[in-house]
């Protein structure tokens, strides 16, 4: 029996689709009042038989920080995909991020050990990787430095430490470090924000760029790692390293909008993040741009997926394919 945490998120819902389509016995954790219909909607993107596939999943109401419900969810489980996480770059959310990402992961690891789970696959982030040196690409071996790391990256790194702790206590683990994940259905977080921005036809684009990857690539790599003899290793999952201008230009073409032509300058970003902080201080609204985010844009990182390509003989799908498909779904849902 396979257990999936975070099954109502972008990665988790696509993972559940692949597992259900392969007739895997699945349990999925969901929190009270979570939106299961969104999982069905994701399934419907790919098949007319989405109701049948959805019914194959045993849904268990549990919370990562509720030991009793979590313990019940782990009954008869042999493999765990840990996809659940809180995503926020807002500094005041640090305690909430710590609770879900770090303490929640520690609880998952402890349950894996207590229930003698055979293998755990954990979805981390490129935010936990070190910075590149010179013109070299970032690899899994680069040492992470907390300096200038955002609150999300700090808690995901601490969560990885809990996973490695589990490996030292006898649990087989695999960690995947994806870039920004491109996929349909989740327009308020992650790459979904880029789709919303492009659909508005904005003339400005941010400087720099980063690693991107299609959600199906992340899922397939996770499944391959779970089924392989590879253990206690981490793998970068980045299909391409475009600039933000490249991404927004591509999306603007799909949305029949003007292409962005003006790059936001760093002096403008320095003013904006300070004004954003002041507005947060006066109103209590969440931060939209932080100093750490601006600093991260100054140093573009290029990520290497050579390890996963070599060890799994994996070929990433073209990023344009994922962008086009997600764009079509975005337009269908925002007409």
Image: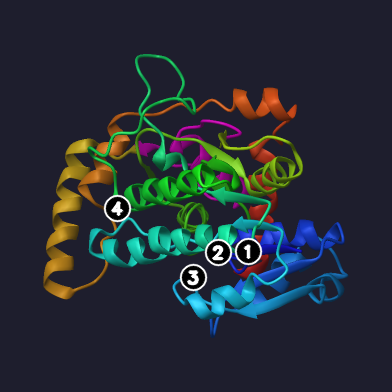
Mark 2–mark 1 contact, CB under 8 Å? yes
Alpha-carbon distance for marks 4 and 1? Answer: 31 Å
209 to the left or right of 112: left
- Magenta residue span: 238-262
Q: Earlier in the sequence, mark 4 or mark 1?
A: 1
Q: Nearer the viewer, mark 3 or mark 2?
A: 2
Look at the picture and state if 318 lies above or below 40.
Answer: above
Q: Which residue is the site of mark 3?
A: 64
Alpha-carbon distance for marks 4 and 2? Answer: 26 Å
Secondary structure under the numbered disc 1 in the rendered image? loop
Q: Is residue 286 visible?
A: yes
Mark 4–mark 3 contact, CB under 8 Å? no
Q: Residues within 10 Å of mark 1 (few under 14, many from 20)?
A: some
Q: Earlier in the sequence, mark 3 or mark 2?
A: 3
Mark 3–mark 2 contact, CB under 8 Å? no
**Residue 114 location, x and y as percent?**
57, 63
Alpha-carbon distance for marks 1 and 3? Answer: 15 Å
Alpha-carbon distance for marks 3 and 2? Answer: 10 Å
Alpha-carbon distance for marks 4 and 3? Answer: 20 Å
Mark 4–mark 2 contact, CB under 8 Å? no
Q: Which of the pair 333/8 is nearer the observer?
A: 8
Q: Which residue is the site of mark 4?
A: 151
Q: Residue furthest bottom?
A: 33
Q: In percent of the image, x 51 and y 61: which residue is there?
A: 110
Q: Which residue is the site of mark 2?
A: 111
Look at the picture and state if 286 lies above or below 82.
Answer: below
Q: In percent of the image, x 30 and y 37: which residue is there?
A: 296
Secondary structure under the numbered disc 2 in the rendered image? helix
Magenta includes 79? no
Q: Is residue 335 visible?
A: no
Q: Nearer the viewer, mark 4 or mark 2?
A: 2
Q: How many marks?
A: 4
């Amino acid at each position: 029996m396979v257990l999936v945490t975070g099954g109502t998120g972008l990665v988790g819902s696509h993972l559940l689709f692949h597992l259900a389509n392969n007739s895997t016995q699945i349990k999925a954790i969901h929190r009270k009042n979570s939106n299961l219909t969104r999982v069905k909607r994701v399934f419907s993107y790919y098949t007319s038989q989405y109701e049948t596939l959805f019914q194959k999943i045993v849904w268990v109401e549990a919370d990562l920080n509720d030991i009793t419900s979590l313990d019940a969810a782990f009954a008869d489980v042999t493999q765990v995909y840990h996809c659940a996480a809180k995503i926020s770059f807002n500094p005041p959310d640090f305690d909430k991020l710590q609770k879900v990402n770090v303490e929640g992961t520690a609880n998952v690891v402890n349950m894996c050990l207590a229930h003698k789970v055979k293998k755990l696959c954990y979805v981390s982030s490129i935010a936990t990787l070190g910075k590149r040196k010179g013109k070299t690409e970032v690899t899994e071996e680069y040492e992470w430095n907390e300096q200038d790391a955002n609150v999300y990256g700090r808690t995901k790194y601490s969560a990885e430490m809990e996973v490695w702790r589990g490996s030292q206590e006898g649990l087989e683990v695999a960690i995947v470090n994806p870039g920004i994940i491109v996929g349909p259905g989740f327009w308020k977080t992650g790459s979904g924000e880029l789709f919303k921005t492009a659909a508005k036809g904005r003339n400005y684009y941010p400087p720099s760029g980063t690693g991107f990857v299609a959600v199906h690539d992340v899922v397939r790599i996770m499944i391959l790692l779970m089924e392989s003899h590879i253990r206690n290793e981490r793998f970068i999952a980045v299909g391409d390293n475009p600039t933000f201008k490249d991404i927004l230009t591509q999306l603007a073409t799909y949305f029949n909008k003007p292409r962005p032509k003006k790059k936001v300058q760093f002096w403008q970003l320095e003013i904006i993040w300070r004004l954003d902080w002041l507005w947060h201080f006066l109103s209590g609204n969440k931060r939209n741009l932080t100093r750490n985010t601006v600093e991260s844009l100054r140093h573009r990182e290029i990520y290497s997926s050579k390890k996963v390509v070599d060890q799994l003989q994996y070929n990433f799908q073209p990023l344009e394919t994922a962008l086009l498909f997600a764009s079509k779904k975005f337009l269908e849902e925002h007409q």
